Image: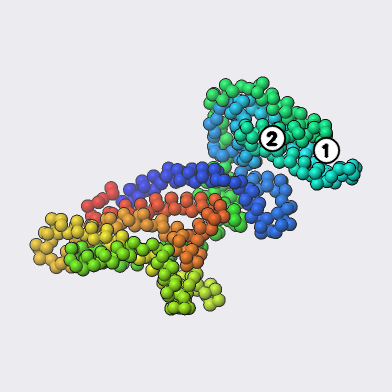
């Protein structure tokens, strides 16, 4: 079995690589710019003063810190017309626009000159001082001048970022009217003419044939994916990021806090609740399933099936709400606390996990959530146990055991039970990852600060690194769950041997 386990663990390597690749692809294609999100989070923490003082250089430092200024992967497959350093363009919309222009005209040199002329025009527009203009010429209306300058800036940004040809042409028509000898900004005429000239040269110098010739660009380990998975292995002491292989999932877009610091406490809460609910469900469901199989087609069996079916048909959010309404409500019965997992005033953080005072303190908070977690599992697990037991009981070796004069308890519990546990173990492999994920609906209803609530908040706040960390963790635990299930097969069924 040890040899089999080692083989399965080695097989995890390509599966983990596949999970990391999928997670990485999702993260890089998520809407928005990570640096912008982190900057907003820092601005929210530091107030408007800090937010307004965030400069372009600060964003560049953030990009370098998190490896966002690197190429995406170890290599890229493109065409002869493309630029192998296009990843250095920070703005995603501008980068996509440049890719469109390269694909349309097939000449990176001409596209690059056009792009630089647009940046120069934008720089000139941003350097214009309206206050000085209005002081020198008192006939100017400051509001109209400011509006015209803002329109020019808006359309320049549109030319830099817009990847639709028809909209680009519309912006040129507007700029033709705003930038002329009769307008307020004669200093923009010369750089604008250069932009128009470079735009016209794109069609004249088009080499679209280059887009049909494939090209491979090699970047090596100095790539975003390598940093994301492994971090900076060569400078581990000073590394800004250690990689997911060492438990570093980056920082949250919501509050700029390291995800590894936020996630483990939440995982512990969800794991405890889910594990307790699974243990309770198995301890109750297995005897019910065995008894129903033993009393097959009797009135008791039919009655148990009806009750369990009714429980299974009730949605968890409904049951949780009803339990809160009747048993955590001052107007009805205030038997249990209505939310949370502890009293912040009376709870002692120095209590150990198995401290009896801690158990007494937290037990009332767990009763209603555990009922909500567990009740629907009774029908599912007991039905699986019943079907498995009925199938085993009809086997020849069970009839032989009875013919030998063994008691019914020994026949059922010793001979039939072990072999009928195989379907239950299979179900456990699928349930195991839920121990970490928890239940979003139940944790939100009972205000439990676990992974379910954290995931709900991450989705609402578009906190993609947290979502990706959750996705990666669940994928890894799913593999562990199936490995544990395979090993348990050999434990309960002596006919299965991994040699």
Q: Is residue 314 above or below residue 8?
A: below
Rendered residue at 48%/53% (across/down): 470
Q: Position of residue 26 (x, y in %)?
A: 51, 45
Identify the mark at residue 171; answer none if there is no mark.
Answer: 2
Q: Is residue 65 above or below residue 167?
A: below
Find out whether the residues at labels 1 and 2 contact each other: C-beta distance under 8 Å: no
Q: Who's the residue at 58% across and 28% down the image?
A: 103
Viewer-proximal residue among 381 and 182: 182
Residue 357 visible in the displayed image: no
Q: Residue 348: horizontal and vertical position, in percent?
A: 53, 75
Applied colour scheme: rainbow
Asked if 332 appears above or below 454 in the picture, the reply is below
Q: Residues within 10 Å of mark 2 (few under 14, many from 20)?
A: some
Which of pointers 1 and 2 lies earlier in the amino acid sequence? Answer: 2
Residue at x 51%, y 52% (from the top left corner):
467
Which label was assigned to residue 395?
none
Q: Is residue 63 above or below residue 198?
A: below
From the viewer's perspective, tell me whether residue 106 is left or right of residue 4: right
Is residue 207 or residue 143 the one in the foreground?
143
x then y, percent, for residue 478: 40, 52
Give the number of callouts. 2
**Residue hosting label 1:** 184
Q: For residue 397, which quarter of the picture? A: bottom left
User: In terms of secondary structure, where does tag 2 sit?
Assistant: helix
> From this viewpoint, is residue 234 visible?
yes
Report how far apart the C-alphas of labels 1 and 2 lie in the structure.
19 Å
Q: Residue at x 55, y 76 (%)?
A: 345
Task: In this rendered view, identify the residue nearer to me: 180 or 18.
Answer: 180
Q: Position of residue 7 (x, y in %)?
A: 36, 46
Is residue 271 found left or right of 300 in the rendered image?
Answer: right
Answer few, some or many: residues within 10 Å of disc 1's Cα (few below 14, many 20 plus, some between 14 and 19).
Answer: some
For the residue labelled by badge 1, is the local secondary structure a helix, a strand or a loop? loop
């Amino acid at each position: 079995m040890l040899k089999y386990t080692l083989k399965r663990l080695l097989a995890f390597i390509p599966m983990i690589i596949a999970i990391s690749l999928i997670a990485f692809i999702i993260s890089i294609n998520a809407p928005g710019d990570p640096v912008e999100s982190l900057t907003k989070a820092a601005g929210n923490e530091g107030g408007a003063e800090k937010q307004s003082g965030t400069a372009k250089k600060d964003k560049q430092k953030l990009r370098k810190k998190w490896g966002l200024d690197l190429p995406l992967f170890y290599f890229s497959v493109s065409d002869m017309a493309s630029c192998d350093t296009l990843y250095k363009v920070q703005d995603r919309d501008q980068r996509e626009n440049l890719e469109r222009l390269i694909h349309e005209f097939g000449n990176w040199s001409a596209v690059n000159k056009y792009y630089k002329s647009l940046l120069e025009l934008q720089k000139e527009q941003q350097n214009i001082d309206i206050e000085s203009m209005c002081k020198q010429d008192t006939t100017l209306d400051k509001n109209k001048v400011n509006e015209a300058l803002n329109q020019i800036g808006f359309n320049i940004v549109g030319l830099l970022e817009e990847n639709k040809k028809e909209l680009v042409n519309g912006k040129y028509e507007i700029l033709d009217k705003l930038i002329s000898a009769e307008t307020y900004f004669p200093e923009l005429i010369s750089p604008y003419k250069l932009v128009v000239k470079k735009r016209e040269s794109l069609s004249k110098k088009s080499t679209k044939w280059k887009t049909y010739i494939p090209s491979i660009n090699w970047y090596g380990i100095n790539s975003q994916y390598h940093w994301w998975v492994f971090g900076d292995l060569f400078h581990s002491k000073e590394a800004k990021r250690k990689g997911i292989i060492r438990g570093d999932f980056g920082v949250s877009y919501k509050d700029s806090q390291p995800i590894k610091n936020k996630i483990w406490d939440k995982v512990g809460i969800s794991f405890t609740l889910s594990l307790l609910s699974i243990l309770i469900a198995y301890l109750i469901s297995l005897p019910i399933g065995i008894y129903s199989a033993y009393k097959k087609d009797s009135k008791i069996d039919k009655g148990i099936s009806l009750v369990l079916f009714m429980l299974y048909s009730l949605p968890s959010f409904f049951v949780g709400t009803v339990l809160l309404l009747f048993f955590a409500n001052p107007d009805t019965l205030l038997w249990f606390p209505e939310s949370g997992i502890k009293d912040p005033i009376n709870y002692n953080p120095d209590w150990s996990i198995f401290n009896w005072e801690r158990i007494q303190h937290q037990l009332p908070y767990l009763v209603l959530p555990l009922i909500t977690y567990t009740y629907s599992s009774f029908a599912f697990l007991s039905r699986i146990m019943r079907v498995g037991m009925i199938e085993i009981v009809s086997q020849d070796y069970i009839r032989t055991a009875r013919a030998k004069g063994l008691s019914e308890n020994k026949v059922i519990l010793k001979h039939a039970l072990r072999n009928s546990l195989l379907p239950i173990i299979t179900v456990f492999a699928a349930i195991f990852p839920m121990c970490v994920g928890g239940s979003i609906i139940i944790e939100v209803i009972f205000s439990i600060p676990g992974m379910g609530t954290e995931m709900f908040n991450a989705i609402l706040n578009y906190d993609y690194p947290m979502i990706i960390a959750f996705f990666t963790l669940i994928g890894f635990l799913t593999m562990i769950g199936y490995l544990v299930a395979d090993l348990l097969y050999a434990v309960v069924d002596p006919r299965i041997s991994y040699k």
